Image (spheres, rainbow, N blue to C red):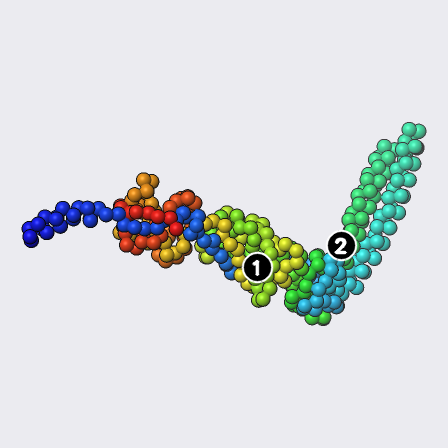
Amino acid sequence: MKNSLLIAALALAPLLASAAESVSVRPFSDVAIYLDRQAAATAESLDEVTLAAEISARVAELRALPGQTVEPGELLVRLEEREYRIALDSARARLSMADAALDMARIRAERARRLAPDRFVSEDQLLEAETNLRLAEADLAAARSDLERAELMLSRTRIEAPFAGAVTRKLVSPGTLAAPGTPLLELVASANIEVRAMIPPDQVDGLQAADGIAFESGTRSWPLRLARIAPVISRGSRGREARLVFIGDGAPAGSEGRLRWTDPGPALPGDFVQLRNGVLGVLILDDEGTHAAFHELPGADAGRPYLPPDLDADTLLIDEGRRRIGPGDRVDPSSR
């Protein structure tokens, strides 16, 4: 009797060993999730400027204070202008003198030209008259340049807003003696605001393909449009700099918050990622539909969602029973 039972057990052993494990399978498209991404971001103005003096003069008046909004061309700082007005008046007087001298030289040259054929003036006198005319013309041109320079220097006593924006810092007070290069005010443009964020390289494609991107700061959210992504990776952050623009009204320059978007690429849930023989991957049904196969996932982290670059949407993943079996095991699949 015992021998009969032993023989029967030995006969059944190969059959039991080769019995298929019952598992369920699901297409990757059914289990895929779409990852919410976020990155620290800041709203920055493309135009930030420190307005500085271009001439030497005392600050006569400050017409803008920190926090004040200004329009393009609005007077912000007025420097003492008396010295430059005197120089302008002097340049105008010199121009008048040069203009009169040119008239006299032109008359004399014309007279010499008329008298030269009859020998009433010598060739040297004619040459002298022609030379004096050219000198007078050059002197008039120099006087005009001096006038333009005097007008330019006077205009530099008025520092105007180059664009619409807000004054952020006042760097001088009335009475300060300014020299060329002395900082006066800091101004930040209220337009041309961009959101800046550093994006991990493996998330760049998802950001570029995302349907909706938003900048969140405090309790508010603003929609964005991707403008450009730097083609290089930053040494410090090991990310790529993304620049985005607001759709409609945007957050004030200097706002800090988060960039948020949903990656449109299907991701594998973290509990499908398994470690087998020191390699991370996912168990799938082989082409024959009879055995478990192991699809490696380079760069995956155990227990974390993963964006597989080469996993087709209709690939059948082993769902229930995946922890009981290993690569190469026979399975009896059923769909959920």
Q: Amino acid at mark 2?
A: Leu
Disc 2/disc 1 C-alpha distance (Å)? 45 Å
Which residue is located at x 51 percent, y 51 percent? Answer: 207
Q: Position of residue 2 (x, y in %)?
A: 7, 53
Looking at the picture, does residue 241 appear above or below residue 65? above
In this picture, residue 284 sits left or right of residue 223 = left
Q: Amino acid at mark 1?
A: Phe
What label sits on residue 309 in the rendered view?
none
Please say whether residue 66 is visible from this viewpoint.
Answer: yes
Which is in the foreground here, disc 2 or disc 1? 1
Mark 2–mark 1 CB contact (< 8 Å): no
Residue 334 vertical position relative to residue 107 in the rendered view, above or below? below
Q: Which residue is mark 1?
A: 215
Q: Residues within 10 Å of mark 1 (few under 14, many from 20)?
A: many
Residue situated in front as seen by the camera: 173 or 37: 37
- Front residue of this view, candidates 264 and 155: 264
Question: What residue lies at 81% left-to-right and 40% top-to-bottom?
Answer: 134
Which residue in the structure is indicated by mark 2? 152
Residue at 49%, 48% in the rendered image: 205
Residue 88, x across and y down, in percent:
81, 57
Residue 240: tell me if it is visible. Answer: no
